[in-house]
Image: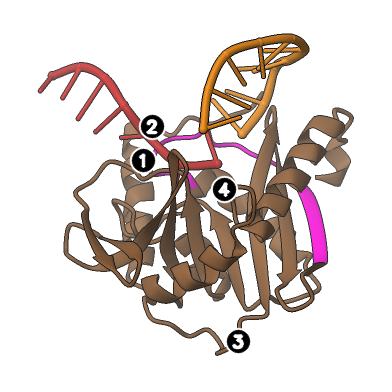
Chain colours: A brown, B red, C orange
Amino acid sequence: MSLFYPSESLQHKLHNTLRKLSKKVLVADTLPNEVRLVAGLDVAYRGDVGFGALAVYDVRKRAFVEVLVEPTIVRIPYIPSLLSFREAPPMLKVLSKAQVAADVYLVNGLGALHPDGCGLASYIGVVTNVPTIGVTKGLLRGNYTFSRRGGYEFIANERGVVLGARIRLNKRSLYVTVGHMVSAERAVEVVHPLLGKSYLPIPLLKAHEEATKAARGSSWVRQSQL
DNA sequence: GCGACAG
DNA sequence: ATCTTGTCGC
């Protein structure tokens, strides 16, 4: 209804914003020895309304500690490499309502393995100052280098910096990338054990289901509650 | 120059 | 991402 399509010049500015934020991304493991609470963040849509979902999972209890969904009006369309400006608002809103702080947040999107060095996962991490890991089914176009180490296929960007790993499942692949305050090695170590029957780690699958359920279920979303 | 490209 | 039922395959 009111999507604002960024002009060419504005898109350049948005890319500059991402490049500037990329300098603040911390590519190093800062997670506690035992990662107990892992959260999943995703967004599903219904027209111009984005339903941001947060699911905090307790690895030890194997149970969800908190599940939240918050609607937000999205104003920017999906543009490859500029996903943050469309999906970060819904994610930041649901995060602001959270009662529990997780040890790390799994974000449905790329991390630092992005043309501007700052994908959605890194964006969320830098802006909120929390550890994040990006999880996607694919990568954006770019020159990457794959190398096998310790059972995983690590991925380095054009500069040779290792920022992610590829996990092959059945036919597809799952890409795990450094978001913020985590290393590629630790990121994949955290995500891999959370892969159940689905190709998505448990927290993300839950967030995805909740977001999708909310998007389909309520066509009666009132503007007043946005 | 054109196309492809996270969700 | 979303619009959408049944159906082919491991």
The mark nearer the N terminus, 3 or 1, is 1
In the picture, the disc for residue A34 is 3
Amino acid at pointer 3: Glu
At which x and y percent is residue A81? 38, 44
Q: Which residue in the protein does label 2 denote? A: A7
Q: Are marks 2 and 4 on the same chain?
A: yes
- The image position of residue A216, as x and y in percent, is 80, 31
**Residue shown at 23%/68% (left/top)?**
A161
- The type of residue carrying mark 2 is Ser
Q: Nearer the viewer, mark 2 or mark 4?
A: 4
The residue under label 4 is A199
Disc 1 from disc 2: Cα separation = 6 Å
Q: Please tell me in which quadrant of the rendered image residue A48 appears.
A: top right
Q: Quadrant of residue A12?
A: top left
Residue A126 in view of the camera:
yes
Q: Which residues are magenta?
A: A65-83
Amino acid type at image mark 1: Gln
SS of the residue at dot 4?
Answer: loop
Depth order, front residue of A191/A91:
A191
Residue beneath the point at 43% across and 82% down:
A29
